[in-house]
Image (cartoon, rainbow, N blue to C red):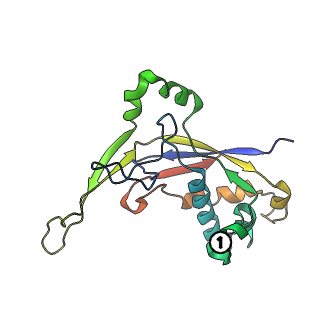
Amino acid sequence: MSKQTHKIQFKINSYWQASTGRGGGTLVDSLVHKDVNGLPFLPGRTIKGLMRDAVYKVEQWGHLPKTATYYLFGSNATEEGVTRLETEPGALAFSDAVLPKEIITWLSHPDNAEIRQGLYQHISSTAINPETGCAVDKSLRAIEVTIPLTLTATITVLNNETLKELNWGTGKTWKDGLKSCLKLIRAVGALRNRGLGRVIVTIE
């Protein structure tokens, strides 16, 4: 029997950076995630982390069942005090968020290499000494960012019976519970506190 799936859309309205944690030589201190064709994507583990954090906050505020975070996303080693190998899986799995299939096909063509490069920009920043108003020595930092895009990921229900154990409210489902948390996700990627990655998230 095929598993139930739903689409989750990320309309990113500003430059954003899903960082690889790697640098790009002498020109760029931080590179973004790209697939084998050089196209941007938002990793599924990042999406799961954003969703988990939003659901956990709403649960703590008393607007979702007390065990919602655990049932949806599984146990968390940091929160539960167990090792990574001892964690329990959740009922939901998240794919990477990617561009529409037809756009991926078109951009992946060898003739469109220059257009692919146009998906990325380099931005620089530096720390300023508040007393002198001058740049702090050796603080100049350049990062690679991706232009505003709309990406879509897939949520797969791994265990529907687990989801039915929770009381979401009269006439409501786990998807309604997730939707109520989406406004808490206002940005994605690195440097969200610097204005990068402003986003609107919706679930179909």
Which residue reaches farthest top? 111
Q: Quadrant of residue 164?
A: bottom right
Q: For residue 60, say whether it is visible.
A: yes
Q: Amino acid at mark 1?
A: Ala
**x and y percent of residue 115 in the render?**
39, 29
Q: Tag 1's secondary structure?
A: helix
Placement of the C terminus among the 4 image quadrants: top right
- Residue at 27% x, 50% y is 26
Residue 61 visible in image: no
Residue shown at the point (54%, 58%) measured from the top left: 185
Q: Is 18 located above or below residue 149 in the figure?
A: below
Residue at the (42%, 50%) spot, across then down:
16
Q: Which residue is mark 1?
A: 77
Q: How many marks?
A: 1
Image-based side of 57 in relation to 133, left or right: right
Dividing the picture into quarters, in which one does residue 134 lie? bottom left
Against 35, is 62 above or below?
below
In which quadrant of the rendered image does the N terminus lie?
Answer: top right
Question: Foreground residue, 18 or 6?
Answer: 18
User: In this view of the protein, which residue sits in the foreground, 173 or 7?
Assistant: 7
Determine crowd level at label 1: few under 14, some 14-19, many 20+ residues with C-alpha closer than 10 A: some
With respect to residue 6, does 180 lie above or below?
Answer: below
Residue 36 in percent (x, y) is at 52, 37
**In the displayed structure, would residue 199 be above or below residue 74?**
above
Pick the front one: 50 or 143 = 143
Residue 68 % position (x, y): 73, 67
Along the horizontal axis of the image, is 141 left or right of 93?
A: left
Please give the name of the residue rendered at 24% of the width and 59% of the height, measured from the top-left corner. 140
